[in-house]
Image: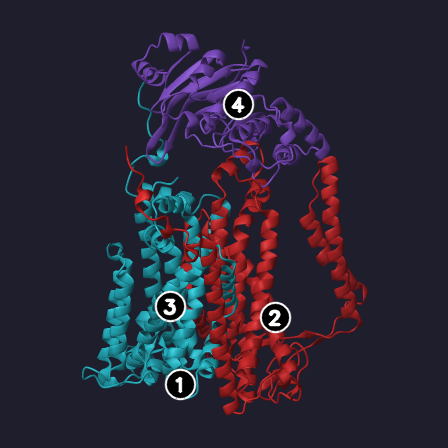
Chain colours: A purple, B cyan, C red
Amino acid sequence: MPKDEVVISLKDVNKWYGTFHALRDINLDVRKGERVVVAGPSGSGKSTMIRCINRLEEHQSGTIQVNGTEVSNDVKAVEKVRREVGMVFQQFNLFPHLTVLENLTLAPIWVKHMPKAEASDIAMKYLERVQIHEQAKKYPGQLSGGQQQRVAIARSLCMRPSIMLFDEPTSALDPEMIKEVLDVMVELAEEGMTMVCVTHEMGFARTVADTVVFMADGQIVEMNTPSELFGNPKEERTRQFLSQIIRH
Amino acid sequence: MAEPSVPQSFAADGLLSRPIAWARTNLFKSPGNTVLTLVAAWVLWLLLPPLINWALVKATWVGDPAACRAAGGACWGLVTEKYRLILFGIYPYDEQWRPFSAVLLFIGMILMAANPRFWKPWLGAALTAGLVIVAVLMWGGVLGLPPVSDDRWGGLPLTLILSIAGIVLSFPLAVVLALGRRSQLPAVRAWCVVYIELWRGVPLISVLFMASIMFPLFMPEGVTIDKLLRAQLGIILFTAAYLAEIVRGGLQAISQGQYEAADSIGLTYWQKMRLVILPQALKVVIPPLVGQFITTFKDTSLVIIIGLYDLLSSTKVALSDPQWRAFYVEGFVVAALIYFVFSYVMSQYSQYLERRLSAGVRRQ
Amino acid sequence: MVEPVSSSVSSAEFHHWWNNERFRGVLYQLLLMAAVVAIGWFLVANTLTNLNARHIATGFGFLDREAGFGISEHLISYMPSDSYLRAFEAGLLNTLEISVLGIVLTTLLGVVMGVARLSTNWLVAKLASAYVEAMRNVPVLLLLLFCYSVITVSLPLSRNAFNLFDRVFLSNRGLRVPSLIWDENAVVVVTAFLVGLLISVGLAIWARRRQDRTGQEFPVVWGSLGLLFGLPVLAFLAMGASLSFDVPHLAGFNFAGGSTLSPEFAALLVGLVIYTGAFVAEIVRSGILAVSYGQTEAALALGLSRMQVLRLVILPQSLRVIIPPLTSQYLNLVKNSPLAVAIGFPDLVSVANTAINQTGQAVEGVTIIMGVYLAISLILSFVMNWYNKRVALRGGR
């Protein structure tokens, strides 16, 4: 059960791409240990919102606070936030010119100034957790999609983040590999990691999430526990979306 | 929920807000950027006004060197005086409508080859026919046209002849070489590789030297081969190697499935290539093909080395007149502009074509 | 029930030996070989006949004969009484000199311009684009002739030369700079520089090992720069702060003393570098754009700084994309250097041309030219292929 401390707080956040209003008055609080799933149709602003949290996108108005630090143009603040927040991308974005092990040790060595041996030990531990340790010396191009995504998760974990962001982590995977990645994510959740996850996997949302946030057209339409949101949606838009995706 | 107001930078509070916002992001985003902008603007300020002053304001358009020197600006009089020499070389004055028509015909041929509507099997034959007409026009001796030997040809028509004939006539050889390089027969592949790597490894100048000096030696006793033909042959053999690599790239880009489908419906090797593979392969490599045409077009300027008078060397000849020697800038600028217009238009068009053609192709 | 088609066709129509695929393959190859041999024999026979008729010798014996012509600049000593072979060597060294300098300067210019084209500053990006588009659409020979004309026509005569502190002179005879006199002091200072170079290499290796062990970084770049500047300066001061130079001075119509950058060399170098630099700029730009933005995002999300992202993630991946076409451009620069013939710089082709004109031995002369360039191309290609294989991204499912 999530504790009461708020680790991510978005207040009246707005973002425009030129004249396109991508995020409208977003208000969201995430507590420590809470698992949040963000769902919604394409173009609803889900990815934009979580990318604003680690400043991969800039918001124009409102405030975003992560672990007490405000996300702004201050370079030091952004570096601090990025050290505490890990992110997993839809396209994995592993570094193809480095081995799996080197992918994991890159940031600990160059950002945390860890000696190589220590970084490698930590890396191997995480590789074992995601069950990829025999592939440590391989290159990303030699791994399957599911394996690459697990390596990507391990890479983020090596920086010991207190919060993990997932941007549609399984959307680029073949169906038979989705389960191995979701299993890792479930394990992480059970260990108490604070997670904000943009995904289409409603089964995952039902079993793991504490809160499901439904977004459409840049706004948060509805936010509730999974059983409430799926069983008893209050807004018409939510009902429309649910009827479209929960068909099989 | 009330619609929040648009933040200041996008508020429509006047005509200037947009340009100012644009300038702020694109020119003055950070201190470093601001410095760069100021330096660049200062350099432009130093160069542009004097340049415009020289090129237009103080320029003389009359063909009098003394007047030019007095005015101190650009001497476009050079162009008005010598444009015939620059454009047509030493072709007899009265017959210069012939090279002029040849240039127009060439432009027509380029336009035709560029239009996808004309990409039918007979395009090659049509272009070759165009070349024959140009040859007749330039050489004369038939149809009541007084003969003009090719050592009087020069300027823009010569440049176009060398480059267009170079590409059109080397194309069949290039296709054969590309197919040969991918052949399963080791001897065929080996010879194609040797040919391609040999001609790609040596400078065009040495090829032109070879053509100019050695081709006469290759001829049996009593047979002569005139200078233009030597150069043209050298350019054809040279360009074929580069075109072959481009075509080979296109062949590689076609998925194995196409080859297999063509085989499975019973086409012979040559039918497969002609009807299925090559049409697709050539479409894929249009940008590099146009790039090669532009390169060949510019490379024809090298024939100055073996004594032929293309556009660039005609310009140089025009400038060797001691009266006009000091105005070399104007001469080279005019020649450069002609090359630039041809090349730039072609490359822009090829980009446009690429966008248009790939719009219909779904990427796998 | 359908009757099988084959029963209506006699089976003797198939399995003819001349339809056998393998047989055909062998046949085609034999025909090709025969054709090549026939053409070759035809050309060689004609050539020999023609050479005989004009009383032109064959063979490379002429290389030992006295050349009898001067070469305006040479890195090795050469006099007209030296052999043709010596002349060719001088020409070859000139070609290599232009090629090496050209490649280095082109790379620098190209990288700067390529990065400038990607700048977020609109003005800088547009200016760089204008430069690239201009160079790609004009012939290199035009550029060379233009540069040469600028130098020989527009620069002042020697007696009115631009001068810098009465030491450096710029005129239409070229750029004249003081040259270092090779005495004891000079040797020590230069040795100090070389020692600094070696120590820098050692420093880089040591710093890397230290980082692996302790995680701490060491400013290798600044340290090396300090060594490369500091050591020679220390040596200079220690030796009494005196280096002697041969300063050029006006003597008659030209300068004497010092060393020269001739108009021909300068025009060729500047023209080739400005021209090829534009193509390199394009290659650098595509290389950097080829790395998907997701890589930058992932690296930033891990907390790496912008400089670290560029150095550790973007640059290594761009290099893989940049190196092959970059090598082609280097080769193009080398293959464009014979344009020296048009402005009178004595490179290999220029020298060979003179030799051919004097001896009439065109076949041997052209063979030497083509052989040398072919060798250079093959060596560069070989090195490039080896490097490519080494750094190729492994995988590819």
In the picture shown, does residue B45 fall above or below B361?
Answer: below
**Pointer 1 local density, CA inside 10 Å: few below 14, some 14–19, many at least 20:** few
Please give the name of the residue rendered at 35% of the width and 68% of the height, measured from the top-left corner.
Answer: B169
Q: How many marks?
A: 4
The amino acid pointed to by label 2 is Glu
> Does any portion of residue C173 appear in the rendered image?
no
**Pointer 2 local density, CA inside 10 Å: few below 14, some 14–19, many at least 20:** some
Q: Which residue is mark 3?
A: B297
Return the residue found at the far left: B144
The amino acid pointed to by label 1 is Thr
The amino acid pointed to by label 3 is Phe
Subunit under mark 2 = C
Mark sitting earlier along the chain (1/3): 1
Please give the name of the residue rendered at 45% of the width and 78% of the height, measured from the top-left corner.
Answer: B211
Q: Which residue is mark 1?
A: B224
Are discs 3 and 2 located on one and the same chain?
no
Are discs 2 and 4 located on one and the same chain?
no
Q: Which residue is more in the foreground, A143 or C56?
A: C56
Q: CA distance from mark 1 to mark 2?
A: 40 Å
Q: Which residue is mark 2?
A: C97
Subunit under mark 3 = B
Q: Position of residue A221 (x, y in %)?
A: 35, 17
* Nearer the camera: disc 1 or disc 3: 1
Subunit under mark 4 = A
The amino acid pointed to by label 4 is Val
Q: Which residue is mark 4?
A: A181
